[in-house]
Structures are given as structure tokens and as C-alpha cells.
Amino acid sequence: MKNMKKFSLNLITVVLASTALAACSSSKGGDDPNTGKYLTSPPTTSAKPIDSSSSSSDESSSSNDSTTETEQSADQNTTEMELAQKEADAAAKAKAEQEAAAAAAAAEKAKIEAEKVAAEAAKAAEQAKVEAEKAAAAEKLAAEKAAADAAKAAEQAKADAEKAAAEKAKAEAEKAAAEKAKAEAEKAAAEKAKAEAEKAAAEKAKAEAEKAAAEKAKAEAEKAKADAEKAAAEEKAKEEAEKADKPRVDKNVAEVKKGFGTSQTYTDENTNNKFTYVNGTIVKVGEEFENKNFATDNKNLNELVIDGKKISLYSDDEIVAWRDQFHPEDDKNGKVGSGNNPITAKDIKEGDVAIGKVGYLPSKRNSQDFEQTRFGYIVKDGITHLFVQGIRTPEEGSTNRSPFNYSDLQSGYESAEGQQIYSVDADGKVTGVYTYKGGAFYGKDGQYIELSALGAVDFDNKNLMLELKDGEQTKLTLGAKVKGTEFDGMLNGVQTKGAFYGSSGQDIAGVFYQTQGDEKDYNGAFGASKVNCTWRGCEQLSNDLKVVEEMKAEVAKQADNVKNATSDWAKGYYQEQLDKAQSKLTHSEEIVPKLEAVKDKITE
């Protein structure tokens, strides 16, 4: 279609160009080069007629004017020439007009012919367009038909393929289904057979298990019966044994409860000062206990007397060596030491042979913890003795003196004045609850281990509680009721007996005996001293919530003081105050509740 339009435009252009060239040739005319004549006849024109009025006028003029014939002749010639010129101009103009008319006619003719040619060309082009459109339509129709035929063929092929595939799939599915059904049937049969076999096996196993269970149950029942009978017999035997053993145990308890008693005093002949003899208890332990007669005239705290024989616990040299071991610079400068010595038990020796242990010495030169107390055990010739001795805290309303002054001995001399010992109620100092910390020796048949001790004494409600631990494990808890400057009681089968020593009940020490359980007949000695003490007194514990909050505030305050300290001395001082405050808070939160928990379980 596009090519037909292009062809029609080219054809019209050629026709118009040919027509224009023909028109130009016709309008110019010209001589034939062979004949010298015009190719076209010149236009015929008539001579212009002479005006009659003009002629009459001339004639009249001619008759009237008195001109000469010569002049008239000249004028006539001039007139003729002008006429000839006019005629020539008219002829030329007529010729030009004739030629222009001919050219216009030729152009019009060429135009008509061109328009005719253009019309014919347009007609031809339109015809070609129609033919092309017909051809295109035919081609399109043919293409669409071919496409439709192809699509139809493809659909048919697809349908045939799908049909074939479906038939194949169906056949395969039917085959697979048949095989599956066969396999399932075989599997079901196998499973059924297996289930039946398992059922049979299970029934057999069940029967065997029931039989075995019945036999086992019977055997266990018989064993349980035998065990019950044995346990009952053992329990009965145990009860009978305990019943039979009760007199022995009761006697041992009675022997433990003996001792201590009232402190005896004496007057120094040189100073006329009144001093207190060493007071305590010595218990021979074994199958049967025996409370030995305690020497009432012993003036030496660091010397034990058993059956009249003296045994050194600490010599003066050992006490000074203890000082030098931890405060050599203080010794050289004659200063009172401020550092803490560890609480350490010492071997009691006979010659080079260790025969027992004793505890403890004070933690500082100028402190009073364990100053007036000694406790421990001695094993000699297969016989074990537990011992406690010291300078007893005076009864209420009285004071006395101890001949032993640790601070003086540490400084290299022993004062004849000794040490002033106050009662628990002196100046109203000892009220409330206090923490006691120390250690104990625990064992049987001459084999003893050292335990740590931590507890409290409630001087208001007259209760004592002390936990003995092996590392972090609590081995046993001691409990007693306070009576004056002694305490006595049984808690959870453990009998405890002891006394207060030193000024204002600074120390506690005693012996204990396990009356029941797996560790029946185990025994030991213990000692503990108040903590967080200064010359002003010792810190009291409390379970009052308001007081506990005040303790927490004090801990926070001292922690800030340590943090902001500007010198090592200040930092050390505030750290000591922080340790005391933290200890007081911890013991109030942990020890006081334990004391409250056991106080009603203590029996006398």
C-alpha cells in the first residue's frame, strides 16, 4: 500500500513537468529554421478605421488654413508616420496579446491535461490502493486463516498429546495403584502377622513379667518383712541399747554439766590486791566421762593442772614470739600493735611430742579477745581430756582482778597490778545481743578436728547460740540458757556447758557432748570472743528494722569515707570502721534470726 502511494506521486510529477515544457514551446512561437517562417500564424488584426469627424475637420482645416501645399505635405507625412507607428505599436500589442492569449490557452490546456493526468494518476493510485488493500486484506485473511489453522492444529496436537499423556498417566497410575495396593496388602499382612507375633510375645512377656513381678513382689515382701522385722528388732535393740546406754549417756551429760562453779579469790601479800584464781573444767572423755577435780589454787592462766601435774599451754617466750611474728616493728619501737593476728590454735607439746591443742591468743596487743581464756584437749597414754580455764567474769555487782595482763607481757614486763575484770552488769555495759566468734575442737577417741565458731549471746533474754562449721558446712549448733556467768543447755541432742571469761563477758568457753545420731559420743571444747570491740565497748546486734536501716546507712557512710580518704592512714582507719559496720549489719541480718529460731528449742 505504501509503495502504491509513492508510485502515484512520482507519476503526477512527471506529467506536470512534460505539460509545462510543451506550454513554454507553444507560447514563444518563432521561425522555422528550415523555412524562416513562423511556426504558428501571426494573429490577424484589422487596420484601425479612420475617424470621419477627424477627416472632415482636416478637410475643413485644409480649406480654411492658408498653408502652403508644402507644409501640408509635410504635415501629412508626419501624420502618416505617426499613424504607421501607432499601427505598428497596435500590431505589436495585438501580437503580444495574441501570444499571451495563446500561452494562457496553452497553459490552461496543459493544466487541464495535467489535472486530467493527475486525476487519472490519483484514480490509478486509488485503484492501486484499493488493490493493495484488497491484497493486504487477502494476505491478512490468509495469514489469519493460516494462524487459525496452525493454532487449531496445535490445539489438536496438544489435546492429542494430553490425551495420550493422560492415558499413559492413567495407565501408570493404575499400575502404581495396583502395585501399591499389592504392597499395602502385603505390608498389612506382614504388620498383622508382626502384630500378632508381638501380641503373642507381649502376652508371653507379660505373663512372664507378671510371674517375675509376683515372685519379685513376694521376695520383696518377704525381704521387706524381714527388713521391717530386722529394723524393728534393731530399733528395739537400739531402744533397748539406748535404754541400757541411757544411764551411761546421762552420766556423761552429768559429768559435762559439772565443773566451773564459783571462782575463788586470793589477796596478794605484796600489793594487797585481790585477784581471782583460774576457774574452769576438765573432763576425761571416753566410753564414760569423768569431770576431774579442777585445781582451785591455780594462779597461772597459761598452765593446766591435771591430777596435780602441770602442763604448759603458753610460755612467756611463746607469747612474745607470737607478738614478734606479726609486729616486729612495733616491738622495736615499743609501740602498741594495731594489726590483727590470725586466730590460730597452738600445739601443746611434751618435749617434742604434740599431745593436744589450745586456743587462742589475742588478735592485737591491746585487745582483750581471748586474753583471759584458754580451751582445748590433751591426749596422753590413750586418755583424752577436754579443758576450759580462765579468769571468770565476776558475778553481778562485783569486780576482781586477773594476774595476767597480755598487753604488759607483750611490752616486756608483767605488772603486779594485773588486769581489772568487770562484771557483765558493770556500769550497765552488757545488755542486748552481741556477736561471738572463735573456734572449737570436735572429735572422738583422741581424733579431733578444728572447727570455726560463730554465734551470739542475748544478755537480755539469757540465750546463747553458736554454730560450729567445717569450712562452709555446719557440723552442729550449740544452744544454752545463760545463768549468771555460766550457761547450760541441750539443743538437738547436744549438751553444752560453759562460762563467761574476761571483763564484761568478753569471752565464752565450754565443753559439749553429742548424745545421739551417727556421731553419738563425739565431744569437744570451744571458745569465742565478742567482735567489733573498742575500749568504749562492743557493737550490739539488732533485728529491729529501724536499727538495721541505720546500720545500712553507716555502712554506706564508711564506704564513702574509704573512697574519699586522702591518705593511707585515713584509708586504713575508715576501712576498719567499714569492716566493723559491715560485720555488725551482716551478723544482725543473719545471726540474730538464727538465735531467735533456736531459743525455744533449748532445754536445760
Image (spheres, rainbow, N blue to C red):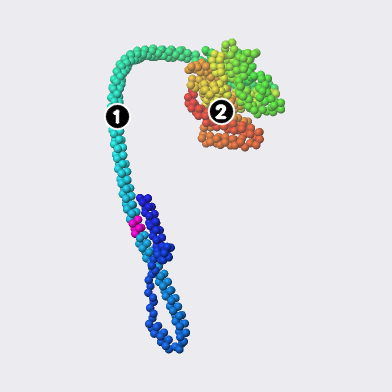
Residue closer to the observer: 393 or 588: 588
Furthest residue toward top: 381
Residue closer to the observer: 92 or 515: 92
Q: Earlier in the sequence, mark 2 or mark 1?
A: 1
Residue closer to the observer: 487 or 171: 171
- Residue under the point 40% across and 83% down: 54
Furthest residue toward right: 333
Residue occupied by mark 2:
435
Q: Position of residue 511 (x, y in %)?
A: 55, 19
- Residue under the point 56% across and 15% down: 447
Amino acid on which disc 2 is placed: Thr
Would residue 387 be found to the left or right of residue 245 on screen? right
Kindly report the distance in space between the C-alpha atoms of the residues bearing marks 2 and 1: 98 Å
Number of residues whose C-alpha sits closer than 10 Å to that of mark 2, classed few (under 14), some (14–19) or many (20 or more):
many
SS assignment at label 2? strand
Q: Note whether residue 435 is visible.
A: yes
Residue occupied by mark 1:
168
- Residue under the point 38% across and 57% down: 15
Q: Position of residue 528 (x, y in %)?
A: 57, 24
Start-end of magenta stretch = 116-122
Number of residues whose C-alpha sits closer than 10 Å to that of mark 1, classed few (under 14), some (14–19) or many (20 or more):
few
Q: Which mark is residue 331?
A: none
Amino acid on which disc 1 is placed: Lys
Q: Note whether residue 418 is visible.
A: no
